[in-house]
Amino acid sequence: MTNRVGIVEVAMTPGVETKDYFLDQVFRVSKEVLDKAGLKRDDVSTIISASSDVFHGGVSCANSYYWDAGAAFLKNGSRQDGESLFAFIYAVMRILSGNHDTALVLGVCKGSENPDDDMLTHFFTDPFYQRQMGLNETVAAALQKREYMDRFGITDEQCAGVVVKNLENALGNPYAHVKKKVTVDDVLASEVVMDPLKAMECAPKSEGMIAMLLAKEDVAKKLTDKPVWFKGYGSSMDKFYLGDRDLLEGQLKNAAKRAYDAAGIKDPKKEIDVAEICEPYAFQELLWYEDLGFCGRGEGGKFLDSGATARNGEIPVNPSGGVLASNPYVTRGLYRLAEGFLQIRGQAGERQLDSKIHTALAHSTHGFAGQCHAVAIIGS
């Protein structure tokens, strides 16, 4: 059994809406990542994809639709629906099993051709008891934000500060969808979507095709001089019914602990050099700081205010702009991982941090108010 799995190369598309054909986009990122590694389709041992069927993809049996465009025709492979960091860990485990030397991970989301995310997430609900209430992801997030503000005194201004930070960070990211300088007042003046959430606090609906090539240790070292190594992973799922949960005591703490334990991390605030966090709603970044162990409970707003998560802070968070800047719903977890990979390699272009990056955290979430969380740790 191999002892390490390395990320060899990545390729991804920008988040802006495009008229490009879905299958052409899948083909381009698949070919680009293989070209970077000097491989052909036949050299890839297994393919794991992340995509959605009827809801976020608009087709049934999604991988049957794009499998050939994704270098996967007649290949050993599988598909994961909904959370793309799960696809990453499935590929890692296939290599660790000793049965595969290389794995191509694909993330597929043609956001511009999908209905609004809230219309789709409405169908996550139980059809007998919840759906008639009109519950969707934004309604759940609004309830969570109100509870966060009431219980811990988090302010609208602090939540807006996340938007200001992330959208400005995105100015240097060619893959971002939304990038502009805004002020706290701009955010607070934006339309109320679902009280207390403002429009600018909510992530957009974006494109997102991504390919990532993994390999076992000896192969990774042959394919690149700068492999980035898988260090640890954790995931955790909360209860289905929103009313059965404490919305401020979710499962991210459990997912993070599993990832930290696997990676040997004792003090995440000191040992993680950059974190790419999935924040579909601005206030959630503050809450996730706490669950990831960067600060104490109820201190997320103060932690942001201190500048600790700025580009030049002690633990930069979302130098890419995060999900508020680009939100390909199904593939956003892989994008967070790709951004960490590029930072470690020193290949993040204008968004490259000034300090040396050795260890990166990638996080993704799925479901109402952070029902499901996944955390991956990678390093040099």
Image (cartoon, rainbow, N blue to C red):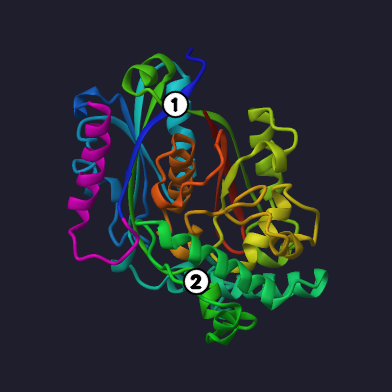
Q: Which residue is the site of mark 1?
A: 6
Overall secondary structure of the magenta section: helix
From this view, report whether residue 229 is shown above or below residue 244: above
Residue 284 position, x and y percent, is 63, 63
Q: Is residue 113 left or right of residue 90?
A: left
Q: Is residue 24 magenta?
A: yes
| Element under disc 2 | helix
| Cβ atoms at labels 1 and 2 below 8 Å apart | no
Q: Is residue 19 magenta?
A: yes
Is residue 327 visible in the rendered image? The answer is no
Residue 85 position, x and y percent, is 48, 43
Q: Residues within 10 Å of mark 1 (few under 14, many from 20)?
A: many
From this view, report whether residue 30 is shown above or below residue 282: above
Which segment is the magenta one?
14-38
Q: Which residue is the site of mark 2?
A: 122
Choose between 95 and 63: the one closer to the eye. 95
Q: Quadrant of residue 45 in the image?
A: top left
Structural distance between the alpha carbons of marks 1 and 2: 38 Å
| Element under disc 1 | strand
Q: Residue at x 41, y 26 (%)?
A: 226
